[in-house]
Image (spheres, rainbow, N blue to C red):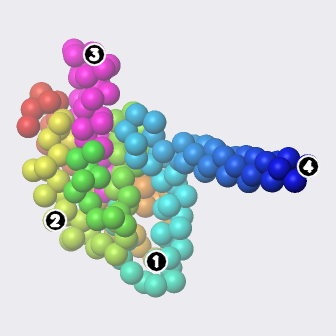
């Protein structure tokens, strides 16, 4: 009887641990992009809200870089979706490898990424983009940088960086080979 109680107790601890791990994995999978292994839109929105609350308290800088891959549809159309997936994975890996540990990379659309940069002003974000352009070359990309303004909502910050990115894309013409380095 004593061994049965010990066995049941051990089994209970094991099941509790497995259930906890399963719950953490499930929550993590609901916040990350399954293809690229970075945050998804849901996870990014949670992080952005947290960072905006922090900035409201501390007054520190917060910048967001909106990235859109140039003519990405042609990669899928001409080289296939598997190649398109590989390009997305290379882009996300290159972004992650070139950021600080407290920065965030998220895939928020099919070929759209955002970088959330705490304690980074727009000038520092522009310097980062210059470095990223040389390092993240699996596909051409356009960007928009926006530094958070006091009282600005998460939606307004994202919209502003997206608008800047679209202006940047239009100004360049965006008629190059998307896989050109």
> Which structural element holds mark 1?
helix
Numbered disc 3: secondary structure: loop
Asked whether residue 161 is in view, the answer is no
Q: Which residue is mark 3?
A: 80
N-terminal-most mark, 4 or 1: 4
Mark 1 or 3: in front is: 3
On residue 55, the disc is 1
Q: Position of residue 170 (x, y in %)?
A: 21, 41
Extent of the magenta region:
65-92
Residue 46 belongs to the span the image colors magenta: no
Q: Left or right of 142: which side holds 47?
A: right
Q: CA distance from mark 1 to mark 3?
A: 42 Å
- What secondary structure is marked by label 4? loop
Callout 2: SS: helix
Question: Which residue corresponds to mark 4?
Answer: 1
The 10 Å Cα crowd at callout 4, few under 14, some 14 to 19, many 20 or more, is few
């Amino acid at each position: 009887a004593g061994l049965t109680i010990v066995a049941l107790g051990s089994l209970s601890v094991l099941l509790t641990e497995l259930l906890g791990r399963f719950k953490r994995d499930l929550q993590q999978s609901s916040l990350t992009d399954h293809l690229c292994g970075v945050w998804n839109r849901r996870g990014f929105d949670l992080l952005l809200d947290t960072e905006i609350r922090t900035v409201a308290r501390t007054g520190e800088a917060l910048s967001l870089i909106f990235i859109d891959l140039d003519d990405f549809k042609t990669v899928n159309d001409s080289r296939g979706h598997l190649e398109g997936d590989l390009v997305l994975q290379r882009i996300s890996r290159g972004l992650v490898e070139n950021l600080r540990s407290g920065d965030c990379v998220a895939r928020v659309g099919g070929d759209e990424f955002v970088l959330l940069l705490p304690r980074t002003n727009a000038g520092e974000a522009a310097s980062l983009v210059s470095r990223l352009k040389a390092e993240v070359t699996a596909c051409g990309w356009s960007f928009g940088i926006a530094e958070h303004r006091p009282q600005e909502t998460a939606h307004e910050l994202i919209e502003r960086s997206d608008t800047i990115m679209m202006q940047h894309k239009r100004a360049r013409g965006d008629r190059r080979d998307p896989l050109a380095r």
